[in-house]
Image (cartoon, helix red, strand yellow):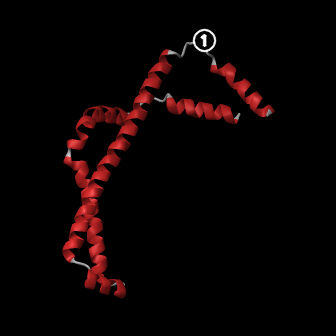
Amino acid sequence: MHIQMNFKLTKALIFAAMTIEEEKFLTYWTVARKNYFKSPMAYLKGFSGGIVLGVFIVLLIASGWYQRANMVANAQANPFVLLMVIIAVSVGMGFIYRRFKWEMNEQKYAELMHKKNSSSLHSSSEHSSFNQQQILPQITKNHDQN
């Protein structure tokens, strides 16, 4: 019984019709995936996240919440070096975020294309000779015996 329910759930998830948002994403990403690395918007989101992280670190140092660390930072740290490190981290976060976002969109695109192709194949093969209703009771019977 458990296998039959899982099979029906999996079948419903794989062969479900695509929603409007999924169709919109497919049309958007087929065009945008070619020029995604040329667009500065994805890079700027990661860069701004790095700047926010750097400002937080500067505020943490300036607040003096840990006196010993504050004394060491004031004695040994150069503000120019700190600024360069913050900029380097921000640039790195920009590149990493852009690549991460591209990979996530590619994964979603591949899943939706598979879903679209599977649903079109399933709708054309509904009247095939393979009858799943006859196979499922045999699977559950064999599973119960083990």
Is residue 57 shown above or below 73? above
Q: Which quadrant is home to the C terminus?
A: top right
Residue in front for this viewpoint, 123 or 61? 61
Residue lying at the far front of the rendered structure: 76
* Tag count: 1
18 lies left or right of 27: right
Q: Amino acid at mark 1?
A: Ser
Dot 1 crowding, Cα within 10 Å, few <14, some 14–19, many 20+: few
Quadrant housing residue 112: top left
Q: Which quarter of the figure has residue 59?
A: bottom left
Of 53 and 133, which appears nearest the observer? Answer: 53
Residue nearest the viewer, comparing 7 with 62: 62
Q: Quadrant of the N terminus?
A: top right
Residue 17 picture location, percent across and down: 44, 29
Q: Residue at x 32, y 43 (%)?
A: 102
Residue 56 percent location from the top left of the image:
29, 71
Compared to 101, does 6 lie above or below? above
Residue 27, picture quadrant: top left
Query: SS at mark 1?
Result: loop
Residue at figure coordinates x 27%, y 68% from the top left? 54
Q: Is residue 41 above or below residue 66?
A: above
The image position of residue 106, as x and y in percent, is 36, 38
Look at 66% across and 21% down and name the residue there. 133
Residue at figure coordinates x 26%, y 79% from the top left: 77
- Residue found at the very far right of the displayed protein: 145
Q: Residue 62: give x, y in percent of width and height.
A: 27, 81
Residue designated by label 1:
129
